[in-house]
Image: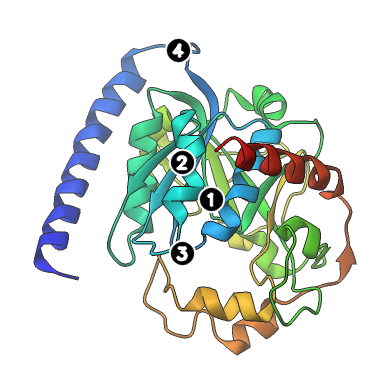
Amino acid sequence: MNKNLKENLKENLKVIRFFNIKRYINWKFKKENNNFKNYFSVALLIKNEAKYIQEWIEYHLLVGVDKFYIYDNESNDDLKKVLKPYVDQKIVEYIYFPGKHIQIYMCNDAIKRAEKESKWIALIDTDEFIVPLSEDNIPKILKKFEDSPGIEVNWMLYGSNGEAKERDGLVIERFKAHSEPSFRVNRNVKTICNPRTVLQASIHIHKYFGNLKSVNTSHKKNIVPFLERESCFENIVINHYFTRSFEEFMNKRKSGVATHQNPNYRDEKTFINQDRNDIIDPVMDKYIPVIKKNILVRNQVK
């Protein structure tokens, strides 16, 4: 990492800390204002995955996301071109975010951006799809959690379906088999949070002002660390398409890891361990034709 980028990251941390103080004052002395421009927003860090982003956006629009904060981590594909119609319609806010192992900085920046705009925000990845189970969209579910600072949503890990090579089709169309719910990796969570309650954001869970506690998707307060408790699959889940095909898995490795420097994080052993295809699940089938139609229409009006 060059000297200028290190200095920029240090400045970002200072800004984050400053806004934590300001956010704390607002949280402590102001009642929650429900008059937000967006009810539910999503943020992610992306690098060279433009071919997946349109499906990901169109799916999340269908289930109730209002706004996307897309952080571009030095992509050299056609990401900006793909995002342009969404940016033009103010559905997407595009942020160029260079550097290595900077996802934690992105998480805190997204919280800062969302605190005045959104009731809720989720920090997820392009291979993660938030799926409503008890209602037909996510906001209907979130309405029932408004007294909580955050909801920790468990993964459901999807495998390669035995596919070695990349082929045409949506991700949710090509990969329909997932692990047994009890598979230990499914104890991992991502958090949908009220950004005004967040003291410090992280990739999976956050720290909140006043020692507030997030809840799981059955409204139970999370006292035990998420990797030490059983997964919960009530109301909402995150479909995690971690492997996709073997070819796609290995291609993603070339982009590096946004969270740490472990060179073995995406090796063949990881693929074998995570490639679980135990249960065929049609939960996403109803979205496939709608997403295809919406992508076609959107591309025709560019």
Q: Which residue is drawn at 19% across and 40% down?
A: 15
Residue 282 in the figure: left or right of residue 46: right
Q: Mark 1 points at which residue?
A: 124
Residue 292: % across, % down: 75, 46
Q: Which residue is drawn at 59% across and 23% down?
A: 146
Q: Which of marks 2 and 4 is in front?
A: 2
Which quadrant is home to the N terminus? bottom left
Q: Do the residues labelled 2 and 4 touch (CB within 8 Å)?
A: no
Q: What residue type is labelled 3?
A: Asn
Circle 4 SS class: loop
Q: Which of marks 4 and 1 is in front?
A: 1
Crowdedness of circle 4 by 10 Å Cα count: few (<14), some, many (20+)? few
Q: Which amino acid does label 1 sit on?
A: Ile
Q: Are marks 4 and 1 in contact (CB under 8 Å)?
A: no
Q: Name the residue under label 3.
A: 48
C-alpha gap between disc 2 and disc 3: 16 Å
Crowdedness of circle 1 by 10 Å Cα count: few (<14), some, many (20+)? many
Depth check, front residue: 49 or 140:
49
Residue 296 in the figure: left or right of residue 285: left
- Is residue 216 visible in the rendered image? The answer is no
Residue 218: % across, % down: 73, 38
What coloring was used for the rendering?
rainbow
Circle 1 SS class: loop
Q: Residue 84 carries which label?
A: 2
Residue 104: % across, % down: 36, 55
Q: Which amino acid does label 4 sit on?
A: Asn
Q: Mark 4 points at which residue?
A: 33
Crowdedness of circle 3 by 10 Å Cα count: few (<14), some, many (20+)? some
Placement of 120 over or under 73, stated as above or below = above
